Amino acid sequence: MTDAPNKTGAPNIVILTGAGISRESGLATFRDPDGIWQQVRIEDVATPEAYRRDPERVQAFYNARRAQLADVAPNAAHLALAELDRRWPGELLLVTQNVDDLHDRAGSRRLLHMHGELRRAWCRACDATHPWDEDLGMATACPACATMGRMRPHIVWFGEMPLHMDAIEAALARCDLFVSIGTSGNVYPAAGFVAEVRGRAETVELNLEPSEGTHLVDRAVHGPATRIVPDFVA
Ligand code: BJW
């Protein structure tokens, strides 16, 4: 680890998580052989064009994924990161690509969801976002402006700008340790974070298997997240 610039003396940490961290909780990843993109095509459910073409199909896909959250719970990897957040005296930012709420439920507080959240909805009429646990559909009215049929999942689809990028970039610029967990490194801009910090921060990958970014990191540990994440933060 490099010397830390903040006044606590503890290194500044940025942790990036992906779908692999939630797999042992029972949520499918995207690109594994049993992944979501083996069941549905990205072009049918995860682009603004898909939503314009067939909003009901897209809403149904996300309604089912939102409902699934009731049947899953944070695992040992989510809990270990929440414990690290509680005890780490320096700067720490957990950036998740995941739209599930397992980091939130585990207790992580210094957390940003860069691809949105299943449990929020966004009104395209008035631009407000709201906590959301129910199904969304064309008959859903916005609680703020009452417009019907303009509420969509608060999810970042392909071609849309990920959320919180200014805060993420600022944390990456200050970080001394970057840890990537459970992500294949296929989707940008998240896949580019490791290249951005390497050379000035220690970089670590924790993943079931080598990812697209393994050749860029200082250290890689491969295995299931529920084992290797608690070991790493202990
Ligand atoms: C385990 C494990 C266990 C399993 N333990 N590990 C070229 C052409 C076209 C576009 C682009 C291009 N180059 C770049 C782009 C942009 C595009 C992009 O990256 N495309 C690539 C496919 C090339 N990106 C975007 O469009 C983004 N926006 C953007 O760039 O805006 C800038 C901009 C916009 C407009 C104008 C100008 C600039 C937006 C990306 C949105 C991604 N959205 C999704 C779906 C929505 C959410 C949802 O439905 O849930 O987000 S895609 C999907 O992939 C999801 C994920 O967050 C994301 C990343 O996946 P993740 O988490 O890495 O999962 P997997 O399955 O890939 O990997 C899991 C890993 O876990 C594996 O490695 C396993 O081994 C491992 N694992 N079990 C530990 N137990």
Image (cartoon, helix red, strand yellow):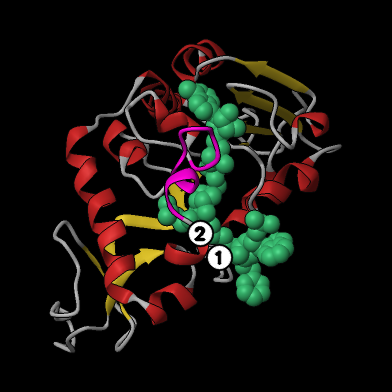
Quadrant hosting residue 105: top left
Per the rendering, the mark at residue 76 is: none
Badges 1 and 2: C-beta atoms under 8 Å apart? Answer: yes
Is residue 122 at least partly visible in the picture? no
Residue 32 lies in the magenta stretch: yes
Q: What amino acid type should be assigned to the residue bearing mark 2?
A: Ile
Quadrant hosting residue 57: bottom left
Residue marked by disc 2: 42
Mark 1 sits near ligand 1, with its Cβ under 8 Å away: yes
The image position of residue 1, as x and y in percent, is: 74, 23
Query: Which of the two discs, 1 and 2, labels the residue nearer the N terminus?
Result: 2
Mark 2 sits near ligand 1, with its Cβ under 8 Å away: yes
Specify the segment rendered in magenta.
30-40
Per the rendering, the mark at residue 158 is: 1
Residue at (49, 69) in percent of width and height: 47
Quadrant hosting residue 142: bottom left
Residue 129 lies in the magenta stretch: no
Residue at (69, 32) in percent of width and height: 211
Q: Is residue 34 placed above or below 170 in the rendered structure?
A: above
User: Would you say 12 lies left or right of 156 here?
Assistant: right
Classify mark 1: helix, strand or loop. Answer: loop
User: Would you say 114 lies left or right of 194 here?
Assistant: left
User: Would you say 134 lies left or right of 124 here?
Assistant: left
The image position of residue 136, as x and y in percent, is: 19, 68
Q: What amino acid type should be assigned to the residue bearing mark 1?
A: Phe
Q: Nearer the viewer, residue 182 or 110?
A: 182
The image position of residue 159, as x and y in percent, is: 59, 71
Q: How many numbered discs, if any? A: 2
Crowding at mark 2 (Cα within 10 Å: few <14, some 14-19, many 20+): some
Is residue 67 at least partly visible in the picture? yes
Crowding at mark 1 (Cα within 10 Å: few <14, some 14-19, many 20+): some
Classify mark 2: helix, strand or loop. Answer: helix
